[in-house]
Image: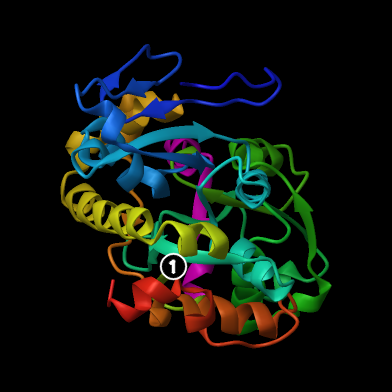
Amino acid sequence: MIRRHPASVKRVAFVSGIAGSAAACALRATSSAAETLQPLRIGIAPSDGVTSVVYAAKAGLFEKAGLDVHIETQSSGAAVAAAVLSGFFDIGNSSITSILLAHDKGLPFTLVAPAGVYDGKVPFTGALVLKGSPLELGKDANDQVISLASLSGIGHDCFSAWVEQHGGDWRTLRFVEVPLSAAAAAVEERRVVAAEAATPALASALETGKFRLIPVYSALGSSFLISAWFTTRDFSSKHPEIVRTFARVVASAAAYANTHHAQTAPIMAEFTGIPLSSFERMVRARQGTTLVPSLIQPAIDAAVKYGSLKKYFPAQEVIDVDLQSRGQ
């Protein structure tokens, strides 16, 4: 059953199985053995980085694995995290830094699967600036206003690292929060000199010919985890098999999605409401297939250095213990 929620928050429901209306983007399992499926409620902050799970739901992979998955969207990773903590969602998706900050504060979150992985060879996120601007985000960024999708997100550390590596003073940067969907407008209206942007909104902005991309995320490394699937330690300890099954399905779906952009583009266009033509032309987010500490540690190190985290800790601390022991 799909629960009803306040209309003020946009939600799109998915249930493993059959595609519903395009407006609702809903899937519902219709297997005669549906009553034997394990229910799993998943919260998503829409982005191309969640393609693996959206594809898995659409293709019925969760249902085949014994899970009755309900997926709903919320406006931000922070909203998803709050809903997971309250028990409204069993598993959620958010930026890696948001989960690291929660861990730093003692909140009982644990990572169960990778989502979006940054690839410096084909960046799908970074700093959006006006095409005619000489800005390189070095010394010329000192004392300037820059927008981030979330003030507590990984973008803060990526911008800070890039500016420092290019001769600027990251401590002078003035950050404001602007949704990814409004990033291009903020730059064009000169309310900010640069804005954090990511596909698919990034692709739409670049297609206008008014902007260019500065790959500030590359300041942290050529490859690292930028978003992930997480749950609470309580849910994981009580439902270890569900968590393991979810992780296995995500890994399989991610491997498929990374090599079948043409096939997943219509699914994500329907899910996000972004025109299919944009998905077909844009650089797609790389889907993570393995949850390993080496992909998480760069974000921790940068977050500590640039003040997002209060203290250092090894990446193993935030990965689900059961998955680590089984080599998932």
Name the residue carrying label 1. Answer: 225
Residue at x-position 70% and y-position 40%: 186
* Relative to 24, residue 214 above or below: below
Q: Is residue 285 visible?
A: yes
Across and down, in percent, residue 285 comes to 36, 52
Left or right: 220, with 33 as reference point:
right
As helix, strand or loop, the secondary structure at mark 1 comes to: strand
Residue at x-position 19% and y-position 21%: 32
- Boundaries of the magenta span: 202-219
Across and down, in percent, residue 292 comes to 36, 77
* Relative to 101, residue 274 above or below: above
Q: Is residue 312 magenta?
A: no
Residue at x-position 67% and y-position 17%: 7
Residue at x-position 31% and y-position 27%: 277
Across and down, in percent, residue 235 comes to 51, 57
Across and down, in percent, residue 99 comes to 60, 64
Depth check: give the residue in front, 104 or 225. Answer: 104
* Relative to 36, residue 132 above or below: below
Left or right: 106, with 226 as reference point:
right
Quarter of the figure with residue 127: bottom right
Depth check: give the residue in front, 148 or 15. Answer: 15
